[in-house]
Amino acid sequence: MDAQRRTFLKSSAMAAAGSLVASGTSLSLPVLAAEDHLPDGDDVRWNKAPCRFCGTGCHVQVGVESGRVVAIAGDKAADVNKGLLCVKGYHVGGILYGEDRLTQPLLRKEGRLTEVSWDEAITIIAERIMKAPERFAFYGSGQWTIPEGYAAQKLMKGGLGNNQIDPNARLCMASAVTGFLATYGVDEPAGCYQDLDECDVVITWGNNPAEMHPVLFSRVTDRRSRGEKVMLIDIGTRRTRTTDAADEYLEMKPHGDVAISLGVMHLLVANENYDKAFVEKHCNFRGAEADAPTLHGEAISEADFRKRIAKYTPEHVEALSGVPAAKIRMLADLFADREIRITSLWCMGMNQHTMGTAINSLVHGVHLLSGHFGRPGDAPTSLTGQPSACGTVREVGTLAHALPGGRLVENAEHRQQCEELWNLRPGSINATPGYHTVKMFEQFTKPTAEGGDIDTMFVQVTNPGQTLPNLNALFNDKQGLEDKFLIVSDVYPTATTRLADLILPAAMWVEKNGMFGNSERRTQQWFKMVDPPGQARDDCWMTIAIAHKLLELGHEGMKDKDGEFIFAVRDDAGDELPVWEYEHYYDTNVDKHLFEEYRGFTTMKHKNLAPYDEYVKARGLRWPVVEQPDGSWRETRYRFSGFDDPFVAEGEEFDFYHSSSKDGRAQIWFHEYQPPPEMPDGEYPFWLCTGRVLEHWHSGTMTRRVAPLSRAMPTAYVEMNPEDARAANIRQGETVVIESRRGTAELPVWIDGRGRPPRGTVFVPFFDETKLINNCTLEAHDPFSKQPDYKKCAVRVMKQSGART
Ligand SMILES: Nc1nc2c(c(=O)[nH]1)N[C@H]1C(S)=C(S)[C@@H](COP(=O)(O)OP(=O)(O)OC[C@H]3O[C@@H](n4cnc5c(=O)[nH]c(N)nc54)[C@H](O)[C@@H]3O)O[C@H]1N2
Ligand SMILES: Nc1nc2c(c(=O)[nH]1)N[C@H]1C(S)=C(S)[C@@H](COP(=O)(O)OP(=O)(O)OC[C@H]3O[C@@H](n4cnc5c(=O)[nH]c(N)nc54)[C@H](O)[C@@H]3O)O[C@H]1N2
Ligand code: SF4
Ligand SMILES: [Mo]
């Protein structure tokens, strides 16, 4: 079985290598298959770590010799990947060794970057915060480790009483969070990856796991190669590698997903073949209030639901979505069949959506209404993209409105609980949520005199100068604003460090201790294996060092109510260890200390975590993890289901124990279809969709420095439909200008390339720093999640001569 999966992964890597032009020599680490895994020898020592990249959360074995990572192998002991890796995983060791790693703090003085000491750098930051603590903002990441995010969260919301902290995950899974909250009353999926081993049908709702979650996707293709029947239905706005593996492809117009899910529910209700017993026992119906809609909406009757959904006939859905009515009937028939098991997967197509919360809860609703829920293989599962979007952002609550463990800034009881757990003076936590990402950058790039009330921004483990939407308005406008100060911690020079006033060199991945939390609620741990280069240091250390400098400068918030430093770490004898001095940071395991403190927050929403040492032994554990009478710790695969979830009472089949209607039930939502925020017109006639490719990680800072990956996919491009290209007299490889109302990007054309967009649409990946497509994208966002829509806006394609198509 593993051999078949490996063949799939290898062939996708090789197909990658054949794309576009490729040349150059490579310096890369040896790639070892899992069975080549070496036992510790005199020279090479092996240790486990989760892969640095995607939310699949594979584990690798890292081979270290003479202080360097020298080899990577798939980890056979890991349940997620069973020894397999995708092409990025095999090359993950190489990301440490790009030639231009940042190794020294750099301060911009009169326009020039000058080396400064760490002490100087930390003092500058602390003094700026002291001057105006409320004007300081922290922009973080779903690639933060759990302890890094937890420390940042505590510094800001606990120590400074400042909620201006938000992560890049706002751009990524915020709509999944609000979707789950609207349906279950609590965040994160109920199912797990095992669903893919047990289902009869997989539906991808506008995502491309063949490239974005390749090892997970190979679980499905592998079953087929063993002769099992798994039907794959791909719904999307363009053909991708996932489509190539699909039995059915439903090509929809942007926002077609909303119409399709309504159409399926309409048919289930009209044909009276939904799961009445499940719905009667475990569900309520919900709709948005007519004026001032809220996240939890209002209860509606089943009759009302039927009335509202009546107009979403297959023919009406066809008109809205472009998907033939017969295909809508085919989908509804599948859902009406209780004998089969159906797993839905989605990612950015549904989250980067101005109806993101709505479409997430509608797809949950399709599963609830049809009773395809809570049995192995029957699950609506949102995938996260980043390695710790779940662990660090959703669970630790590093969003501007959240507190650890599923708590909310606006909730007085939640604030009080956090103040108690942190041993802070009552009232320390500010009751007003901070700015979401788009707003935070608007306030940073707006002149102070015009109300731009953020003046110092600390960016860690993210590259907003490339990845924010509408870059000209949200990032580039910072240029020339003398009183605005941008601090960036990164491992390489980036599009963001271009405008930074202070650059901090960071330790990355196995150069530090860490913990991630993947898409299936799995918390993972690894140890530092090699030293970072030069003066590069841990992000978590930076946060603690800033806090300690603030303490020295007399900031009262850096002390708890007994006068103790909020990040105090004591040894067994009770003496405080000076972990804010980097030479002493590894005198103890700061990660373990922070994690044990954080565990105290996790039980309220039944997201229980085991002690740190359990994660040292495991290849991750899925929460809730609960102690057994024999002292062992048991993970949970299926949440809310009586047969597996320890928090469902004995004898109960299901219990949605955080139900927003407080009756143990989940909510089936109705939402009216709304068109996308910007649509093609005479002036800007094409849809632009943006996204990713297999070989590169987001802004490409790491993967473009690994020669085999950058050779395989050297440059960004614009995918065009052959007929559109012909009509505009555009040739393969020709450079064109993509222009929206917000900006332009120049790209070579790839006709019928990796993906195949339908007529009237183009697609551009955003990994290439030299071709910034986010000059064109839109910051319009979902009203609840505040997640922007990168998947659709209107553009024109211009030949370089200036002619427009
Ligand atoms: N190789 C690689 N893997 C990655 C990453 C990476 O950078 N590189 N990043 C990770 C991260 S953080 C993320 S978030 C994921 C993203 O993973 P995916 O969501 O799978 O990938 P994207 O390329 O962002 O999304 C592109 C898809 O959006 C769909 N789409 C466009 N408009 C609509 C619409 O209106 N509705 C719906 N439902 N779909 C629509 C299109 O069909 C298109 O195929 O990948 C993760 N994995
Ligand atoms: N057009 C378009 N734009 C998008 C999207 C899209 O679909 N289309 N998707 C959005 C989504 S879903 C996401 S998740 C974001 C991702 O956007 P970003 O998070 O901005 O992209 P990354 O390239 O992952 O940035 C991570 C940065 O951290 C650095 N780094 C790596 N390891 C470390 C470390 O240990 N410490 C520190 N300090 N730095 C480190 C890397 O060099 C890199 O610069 O992009 C968003 N932007
Ligand atoms: S699928 Fe994701 S986690 Fe697994 S090896 Fe590839 S990039 Fe890493
Ligand atoms: Mo993402």
Image: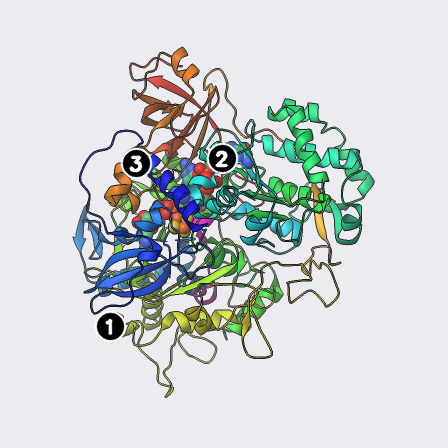
Does residue 27 show up? yes
* Residue at (50, 21) in percent of width and height: 680
Label 1 close to label 2 by CB (< 8 Å): no
Q: Which residue type carries mark 3?
A: Ala
**In the visual, does 309 lie left or right of 422?**
right
Q: Position of residue 262 (x, y in %)?
A: 68, 34
**Above or below: residue 17 compared with residue 625:** above
> Which image quadrant: the C terminus?
top left
Start and end of the magenta stretch? 154-169
* Residue marked by disc 3: 17
Q: Is residue 378 magenta?
A: no
* Residue marked by disc 1: 583
**Above or below: residue 622 compared with residue 719:** below
Q: Position of residue 113 (x, y in %)?
A: 18, 49
Q: Quadrant of residue 9?
A: top left
Q: Secondary structure at mark 3?
A: helix
Q: Secondary structure at mark 1?
A: helix
* Residue marked by disc 2: 245
Q: Which residue type carries mark 2?
A: Ala
Is 575 in front, or is 27? 27
Q: Residues within 10 Å of mark 3 (few under 14, many from 20)?
A: some
How far apart are the alpha carbons under marks 1 and 3? Answer: 43 Å
* Residue at (59, 58) in percent of width and height: 410
Q: Is residue 160 magenta?
A: yes
